[in-house]
Amino acid sequence: MISVGFPPTCSERVYFRDVPDAELMDAVYEAFRRLGWSPHEAGRWEVRGSTPWVPFVSYGSNVTARAEGDGELYLRSQSSFPLAWIDWGTNSGHVNQLVQKLEDLLRVRARKVRGEEGDE
C-alpha cells in the first residue's frame, strides 16, 4: 500500500494472544536484528530501529514496535527524510517484513518449547 504524507507512514496493530509480552519483545528485538534494522530499546515495552539508506531508492525509515499488553503489538514505519511525501509502499513493506519475521521466530520458539526438532 502506497503511503502519502509528510513524511509517509504506515502503522498497524497485530495480535499474538498466546505470547507473553516479555517474550514478544524479545522476539521483536531479534526480528529487528535479523532484518538489519539496528534495534535499540526505547523503553521497557518499545523497540526502535532504522532501515538502511538505499541510494536513489530510499532514505530509509524509522521503525517502531511497542507492546501494548495482552499480546497486542503496535508497529509503525515512517520515512526518515522529512520532506518525503510518497513512499511507493516501502513503509508498508517494512511492517509486513517485521510481522513475517516475528511469526517465523515465534513459530520456532513454540517448537522448541514443545520439544520438537528442527530449527529454521
Image (cartoon, rainbow, N blue to C red):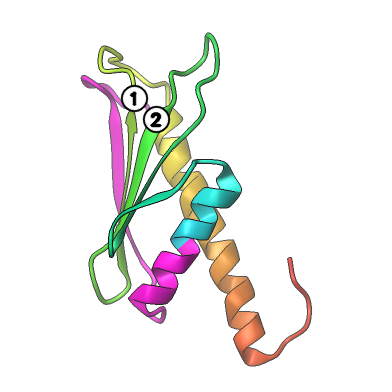
Labelled disc at residue 80: 1
Q: In this view, does 75 lie above or below 9?
A: below
Question: What's under tag 2, amino acid-wise?
Answer: Ser
Question: What's under tag 1, amino acid-wise?
Answer: Ser
Q: Where is residue 3 in the image (x, y as percent from the top left)?
A: 31, 27
Quarter assignment of residue 2: top left
Residue bearing mark 2: 61
Q: Position of residue 46 (x, y in %)?
A: 30, 57
Q: Which of marks 2 and 1 is nearer the N terminus?
A: 2
Magenta residues span 1-27
Q: Where is residue 81 in the image (x, y as percent from the top left)?
A: 32, 18
Residue at 40%, 66% in the rendered image: 25
The mark total stands at: 2
Crowding at mark 2 (Cα within 10 Å: few <14, some 14-19, many 20+): many
Left or right for 66, reference 99: left
**SS label for mark 2:** strand
Say which quadrant the C terminus sits in.
bottom right
Residue at 45%, 48% in the rendered image: 39
Quarter assignment of residue 91: top left
Is residue 34 a member of the stretch shown in magenta? no
* CB within 8 Å, label 2 to label 1: yes
Q: Which of 71 and 39 is in front in this view?
A: 39
Q: Which residue lies furthest to the right in this view?
A: 118
Residue at 50%, 41% in the rendered image: 37
Q: How far apart are marks 2 and 1 (CA)?
A: 5 Å
Q: Which of 14 and 65 is in front in this view?
A: 65
Residue at 63%, 91% in the rendered image: 114
Is residue 26 a member of the stretch shown in magenta? yes
